[in-house]
Image (spheres, rainbow, N blue to C red):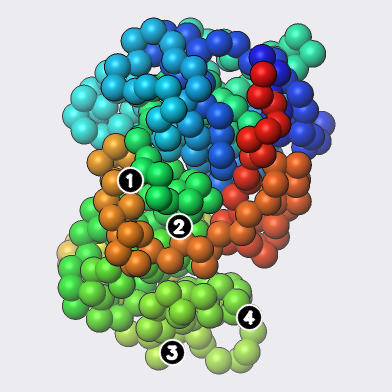
Amino acid sequence: MVIQAVVAGINGSIRVMDCEMDLPGPGEVRLRLEACGICHTDLLAIDGELGTPKPMIAGHEGVGVIEALGEGCDGFAMGDRVLTSYAACRECPSCRGGAPAYCRGAFALNFLGRRVNGDGPVRVDGRPVTSQFFGQSSFATHTVVAARNLVPLPPDIPAALAAPMACGVQTGMSTVMDVLDVQPGERLAVFGCGAVGLAAVMAGVLRGCERIVAVDLRADRLALAAELGATETVQVGVDTGADPWADVAQVDAAVDAVGTAAVMEKAFGLLDRRGRLACVGVGPVGDRARIDARELVFSGRSIRGSIEGDADPREFVPRMIDHWRAGELPLEKLVETYPLSQAARALQALRAGDVIKPVLQMNPENGDE
Ligand SMILES: [Zn+2]
Ligand SMILES: [Zn+2]
């Protein structure tokens, strides 16, 4: 069948094109997509920073409805509404140990965009295009995706709000709730107020933090962080002559949603005794943080990295939906929707930092057989 997809070309072009899609194979379904959020990881892949072969179709926060089933998709049926999170094999030691975010096959399945048998289900003008980025490549009207990477989605949540739960919001919330296990009355700092950082702020509110310090370069993002529940904001990168950290007291837990060595060092320095830092941002290759070895030991602090907040989407997405239903996750404040035809503009809005969470919405009439 012919679908429409946002194809990132070798020369850096972004074009919405007609593509040929195969039927789903064993263990796979075809989704008619409703929406897909845009993450910084999509920009990294399009920029060639993840080794994803081009031409490629990015997109890893898909929401859609099953309209074709391959063999062996037990538990799923035609018409089911689902969310497609990151890809994991569900068979390796990490996956079997309850940590699919650390799947041994994660690099090939997610960044290289490969199926287990190596090829992809989509072609442009008869030539293959990377169409399994994060096991899905959801900047398209349709995707073929492994059933093992699907999470059932109820009908009441709008697609544009569910989509960011596949990656960005999941990462921020799960980092606070599970990786750091922030407790009521604790003091939390969040570095970087994009979708991940703002989700971390919302989770800090949910956990009853006494203080939530939000840190960013931009005043508009800090204003949004405050609206979402941050009790203090620190604008860095502007030369006012005053030290923006002068009045900021130490914290018990911190999230680094930026990923540079400089931010990691600053966040570590803000931790009180026995404080915990979780680093989830993906920064430049080769960036090395300097941590004072004695300080680390004597203060009992800890630093750890996390992918997707360690979350297993099958377990964590239903928890996020419960919080959304309770009115505790005002994701509409983060999301701005664009039609699929405006994908290049949506990508640019994220790159410029003008939109927290752009979400592509697919026209269901387009691309159907
Ligand atoms: Zn695995
Ligand atoms: Zn992502």
Looking at the rendered structure, the secondary structure element under dot 4 is loop
Q: Nearer the viewer, mark 4 or mark 2?
A: 2
As drawn, the label of residue 137 is none
Residue 250 appears left or right of 120: left
Report the number of discs: 4
* Amino acid at circle 3: Ala
Q: Earlier in the sequence, mark 3 or mark 4?
A: 4
Residue that carries the numbered disc 2 in the rendered image: 196
Cα–Cα span, label 3 and label 4: 14 Å
The residue located at (22%, 65%) in the rendering is 182
* Amino acid at circle 1: Val
Residue 36 appears left or right of 214: right
Residue 72 appears left or right of 332: left
As drawn, the label of residue 246 is 3
* Amino acid at circle 4: Val
The residue located at (40%, 78%) in the rendering is 230
- Is there CB contact under 8 Å for labels 4 and 1? no
Residue that carries the numbered disc 1 in the rendered image: 317
- Answer yes or no: disc 4 within 8 Å of ligand 2: no
How crowded is the residue under tag 1: few (<14 C-alpha within 10 Å), some, or many (20+)?
A: many
- Is there CB contact under 8 Å for labels 3 and 2? no
Give residue 256's quadrant in the image: bottom left
The C terminus lies in quadrant: top right
Residue that carries the numbered disc 4 in the rendered image: 238
Q: Nearer the viewer, mark 4 or mark 1?
A: 1
Q: Position of residue 315 (x, y in %)?
A: 25, 41
Q: Is residue 320 above or below residue 265?
A: above
- Is there CB contact under 8 Å for labels 4 and 2? no
How crowded is the residue under tag 4: few (<14 C-alpha within 10 Å), some, or many (20+)?
A: few
